[in-house]
Amino acid sequence: MSKQFQYDVVIIGSGAAGTALALQLPDTTSIALLAKLDYDQCSTYYAQGGISAVLEPDDSFDLHGQDTQNAGASLCDPETVKTVTEAGPSVIQWLADLGMPFTRDRQEVSSSGFHLTREGGHSKRRVVHAADATGIAMQNTLHAHAVEKSNIDLFDHFVAIDLVTRNNRCVGVYAYNRKSQQVNVFAAKKVVLATGGASKVYLYTSNPDGSTGDGIAMAWRAGCRVANMEFIQFHPTCLYHPEAKSFLITEALRGEGAKLLLPDGQRFMHRFDERGELAPRDIVARAIDHEMKRLGADYVYLDISHKSRAFIKSHFPTIYERCKQFDIDITSDPIPVVPAAHYTCGGVMIDLNGQTDIENLYAIGEVAYSGLHGANRMASNSLLECLTFAQASAKHIEQTLAGTNKPGRLKSWDESQVTDSDEEVVVSHNWDELRRFMWDYVGIVRTNKRLERALNRTHLLKREINEYYGNFRVTADLLELRNLVVVAELIIRSALSRKESRGLHYTLDYPETQDQAEITVLSPEPKSENRQRKVTLLSR
């Protein structure tokens, strides 16, 4: 039997953004925090590098902002960049106060007391971290506090299906309970999308299995605009091994001097960028992709073995142990690496309070387009963005909650016209086909011909999936596939509309970068002339 719940706030997603927001709302606010799987099955948990923040006297907010704009190919929103970079110190202090086990500076070189590392695109050491497992430490810290709060109800293994709206106001969400296999209704004054990105749309990704673009697809179906979906960041260095499932090799290795090598041991990054291994991720990933295709190689190497054994094991214990499982001793051997889909720079359009186009609906973290990342996300800016917008949205929700009407009882989920599927093979086949053609045709280097071929396949799959969705009871795999095909179409349409190469979007048909920096906005209005347009980048 379908259940119905009533809350002040429903947060869809239990990673850093969603949990941090829940913790910053008043104790009098009733909150439902929905996790798609277990609470450690989110992208936050897999983040290795750290959080960028200006903490040293030789650094500045302006310099952090300049680095962010340079990495983002001048497509970052200036107001958002200023807001987020200036929030850095308070974000770090808030986490430290919660007991986050940051790595401290044993040599007392840092005036902040934190050990700071440097990653690609940063001109200074400003990345605060917890060894090479910052995400695990953050997720565990936030979750430990959330379970102690009596006003936060935690729901694990709930897959959101669709938002419920009335008169352009969000009043709740339908969610599928994996355990009971029932669809429940969550009514709320405010709904927050903190569902993460969509990198699972690609065959190879560093993300966990749940990164299927659910929030982006739900918001699109509900009437929200999305922006910059063509900018999918491919992390340059994921472990290449037949038994290693998309294990990320943090950029901090390159920050500490690791070198990228061809199979014959030669360095190559200096031929692509004067910053070498510390160039922004789009440049490094494209360079690796170029060399792999030129040589017909399956991978390149990342080598940090010139550092001492003690240094490597103390700074990168997680990577050391993981690689050791595959008989790779990183203190003496180079690591085989390949690029993999890693981060969705575009998403649901929001303002500086995290509000979307729909009243009472917020989006924070990777699901959202805040304007911070532009055409390429700079390393370790993502966790900073998560926490900054969690704080801003919590403040706005607190200020407006009392004036928001309760939605009352919502319509129950209707399964009277559907049956159990006898063709699950359709879901698995379409899932595989979608991710393979996205990898082949909409990857690191693109052409219009490849994009158009991918768009045609997407349209065919979309019709099949929608027909299937209309006839059979929902399953978690079907819901994710339904969302993935929507996200795939948004990525392809956005890529086709950009007549230049900029940041993460590189096309052989338009290899030059235009003088005017513009964001790509897609709108779900039915009129074709409103479905796709460019707007000049302006501060909001």
Image (cartoon, rainbow, N blue to C red):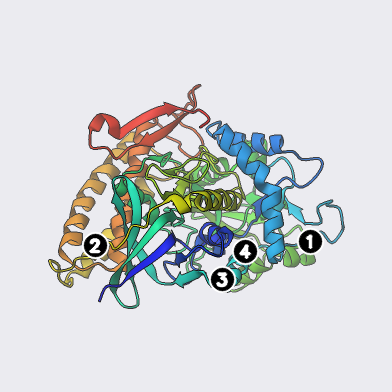
Helix, strand, or loop for circle 4? helix
Q: Determine whether 296 is above or below 413 in the image.
A: above
Q: Determine whether 80 is above or below 144 in the image.
A: above
Q: Which residue is mark 3?
A: 149
Q: Which residue is mark 4?
A: 138
The CA distance from mark 4 to mark 2 is 37 Å
Give the residue at x 34% y 34%: 496
Observer-side mark, 2 or 1, equals: 2
- Residue 239 on image: x %, y %: 55, 61
Q: Are marks 3 and 4 in contact (CB under 8 Å)?
A: no
Helix, strand, or loop for circle 1? loop
Q: Which residue is mark 2?
A: 411
Category of crowding for the residue at label 3, using alpha-carbon neighbours closer than 10 angstroms: few (below 14), some (14–19), many (at least 20): few
- Left or right, 267 with respect to 40, comes to right
Give the residue at x 64% y 66%: 137
The CA distance from mark 4 to mark 1 is 15 Å
